[in-house]
Amino acid sequence: MNPVDLITKKRDGGEHTPEELGFLVRGMVNDSIPDYQLAAWAMAVYFRGMSDAEATQLTLAMAASGDTLDLHDAVAPGVLIVDKHSSGGVGDKTTLAVGPIVAACGLPVGKMSGRGLSFSGGTIDKLESIRGWSPELSEDRFRRQLREIGLVIAGQTADLAPADKRLYALRDVTGTVPSLPLIAASIMSKKLAAGADAIVLDVKCGRGAFMEHLDEARALARLMVAIGTGAGRQVTGLITGMEQPLGHAVGNGLEVREAIETLHGHGPADFQELVERVAAEMLLLGDPAYHSLAAAQAQVQEAIATGTGLEKLAAFVAAQGGETEQIYHPERLPVAPVQQTLSAEEAGFVHRIDAREVGLAVVEMGGGRKKKGDAIDFGVGVVCQAKVGDRVAVGDPLCTVYAANEFSAHTAIVRLRAAWLVEAAPSNPLPVVLDRIASG
Ligand code: URA
């Protein structure tokens, strides 16, 4: 087979056979297909799309491109391994609160998470704001921690879905991230290889997500649910709002702080609602004891009220080398030295916050990477005090910028001024969960 023939076939709208997709995936792993041909192929897929059958075959081939994990020996007999995955968004620190809550409710969570991508943050970068915490775990240690603590969050290993690792890095720099079948194959190949029996997908939709429109987000959720179900897993897809940043905090250390507040039950309303819903959906999928979402949600609220979720976060952080002192005293997490506030110039109601601009402003201040390998400043970020639906008077804070120096803070404030739209007419808060798509 010749890669050029596969590029031209896709460019002209053709449908790949499973053998062709297998050839491409092998070429990703053994480097027999060079970057420029893979990138050209990814661009052809971006424009031409894929049938569901092609996307499923691509996912299965990518999932089988390296090691696959079976974690059942690390949990009690009959217990399901439940995972969650977000398609990426601004201020999305959901895993930091959901993982500990679900584990505190007795369902083990062993997760591989990623780093930031473009304007969207990543769980591993956020957790690295905690002094000493490490995502590097041997497979043995992963299993032991899952057995003993019930919660593990590790970085993606090179051996798990290596085809995705190569393709993802190329997509990131060739404008081919927002392709529905490529996102579905990327996410689901990792979830299948990591051995989850049941998966809750949090598909973000809006300006701060890779899928901006509800119909695209629905199509992505449907495709991922179909791929997972076809591979014998139970999958629930939630489509959740990312038109504005999630919660108040955007930026690594600030987000860990907000996740801790949420485990105390004092999170921002939209974030608290999402955390409780995702956690409840995970319990409902993974634990047959729950017969309804309401029952699962009651258990989640108890884990928050009794503090067992917070205790689980501390135990997990300690097990991965982190200092729990920052969990019990979140004011000791990194905070940038310069703070400037963007104030409302007109009285009225917040109608829009451009989440993507907020995410990009944080990347620009050093909270994300502009190129591979850039160091992260864990203390920088934006705290959005005024959210869509809020009433503001002249001079009220819209957001506070946390920056390394005055120049960087000022640049971010100038950029963010256009991100808030305040108008005289009242506006409504935005919905958190937009739709739900389940297996079967
Ligand atoms: N998250 C992933 O893991 N892959 C994508 O392609 C996009 C978001």
Image (cartoon, rainbow, N blue to C red):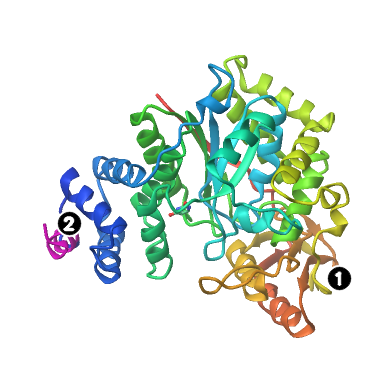
In the rendered view of the protein, which quadrant contains the C terminus?
top left
Q: Is residue 425 visible?
A: no
SS class, disc 2: loop
Indicate the amino acid at tag 1: Gly
Please give left or right for residue 186 compared with residue 414 in the image: left
Q: Classify residue 48 by image quadrant.
A: bottom left
Count the labels in the image.
Answer: 2
Is 56 included in the stretch rendered in magenta? no
Residue reaching furthest to the bottom: 407
Indicate the amino acid at tag 2: Gly
* Residue in view at x 37 percent, y 51 percent: 180
* Residue in view at x 52 percent, y 62 percent: 117
What residue does disc 2 label? 13
Q: Is residue 365 visible?
A: yes
Residue 251 picture location, percent across and down:
70, 62
Between residues 31 and 401, which one lies in front from this camera angle? Answer: 31
* Residue in view at x 83 percent, y 40 percent: 264
SS class, disc 1: loop
Residue 313 picture location, percent across and down:
75, 40
In the rendered view of the protein, which quadrant contains the N terminus?
bottom left
Between residues 70 and 432, which one lies in front from this camera angle? Answer: 70
* Residue in view at x 37 percent, y 63 percent: 176
Q: Main secondary structure of the magenta part?
A: helix
Q: Are marks 2 and 1 in contact (CB under 8 Å)?
A: no
Residue range in magenta is 1-10
Disc 2 crowd, CA 10 A, few/some/many (<14, 14-19, 20+): some
Residue 134 against residue 145 in the figure, above or below: below
Residue 419 picture location, percent across and down:
65, 69
What residue does disc 1 label? 395
